[in-house]
Amino acid sequence: MHAWGAKMQVIAPGITRVATSKNDNSYLVEGVDGLTVVDAGRAGAADAVLHAAATLGMGVVRIVLTHAHPDHVQGSAVLRRRTSARVYIHNADAAWLSRGRVPADGRSGAMARRYDGLAAGQWTPVDADDVLTDGDVVGGLRVIHTPGHSPGHIALLHESTRAVLVGDAVFRTGRLGLGPAGFAADPDSRAAAVARIPGDLSAVGFGHGDPLIGQEVTDFETWRSRLAR
């Protein structure tokens, strides 16, 4: 567990947010066979995730990655080794995960490309056990392909509660937004990707920032309607 303490927050029945750092979130989704981790976080995040899993009294059986960027996948190798969980990612990002870094043409901005060349921007290569496509269901989560931030970026709809985990398709750091364009593979595709996320939601969980729960979800719908204009 990180020295500062990992924050745990239930955002919907059976879904717990784990703040693995002050800015990064992983999620634990309960199922009949165990826990699904959504996003493994940065290097060192596995301790916080496993502490949260132990608090829930359940084992981790799968790791679903919203996309292959270092702040979401660096913890994957350690987490898989410590749990024997299966790793899932969209097929368009699977090669990046196996390579251990974002390729040179995987970001639109020069600063982001420089970051990817540093050790902090890379990770232990991981071969996915299974690849996902739009419409797949894994661990009670329906895959929604939301390309733009990365080619294989996905959001995940928890069908039984109508909570959605949007990864980095949307950021909530201060206010709702699409995040820095330079860190996206195809910034111009991001708004269309957000439009693919369904409505009638009970909660919205972000890769970065606090979730929206209950009546707060109207903020997401209002922002999204403005984005579509």
Image (spheres, rainbow, N blue to C red):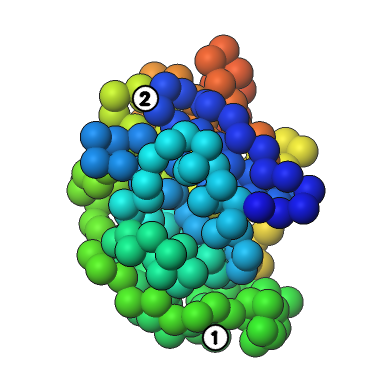
Identity, as a three-letter code, of the amino acid under mark 2: Arg
Number of numbered tags placed on the structure image: 2
Q: Residue furthest top?
A: 215
Q: Which residue is mark 1?
A: 104
The image quadrant that residue 93 belongs to is: bottom left
Identify the image quadrant of the C terminus: top right
x, y (%) of residue 130?
23, 65
Tell me the SS state at disc 2. loop
The answer to whether residue 187 of the structure is visible from this angle is no
x, y (%) of residue 216?
60, 18
Question: Is the C-beta separation of discs 2 and 1 under 8 Å?
Answer: no
Left or right of 158? Residue 107 is: right
Identity, as a three-letter code, of the amino acid under mark 1: Ala
Q: Which residue is mark 2?
A: 162
Left or right of 159? Residue 104 is: right
The image quadrant that residue 111 belongs to is: bottom right
Camera-side residue of 144 and 118: 118
Tell me the SS state at disc 1. helix
Q: Residue 79, relative to residue 160: is it above or below?
A: below
Q: Residue 72, relative to residue 121: is it above or below?
A: above
Separation of marks 2 and 1 at Cα, in angstroms: 36 Å
x, y (%) of residue 106?
51, 76
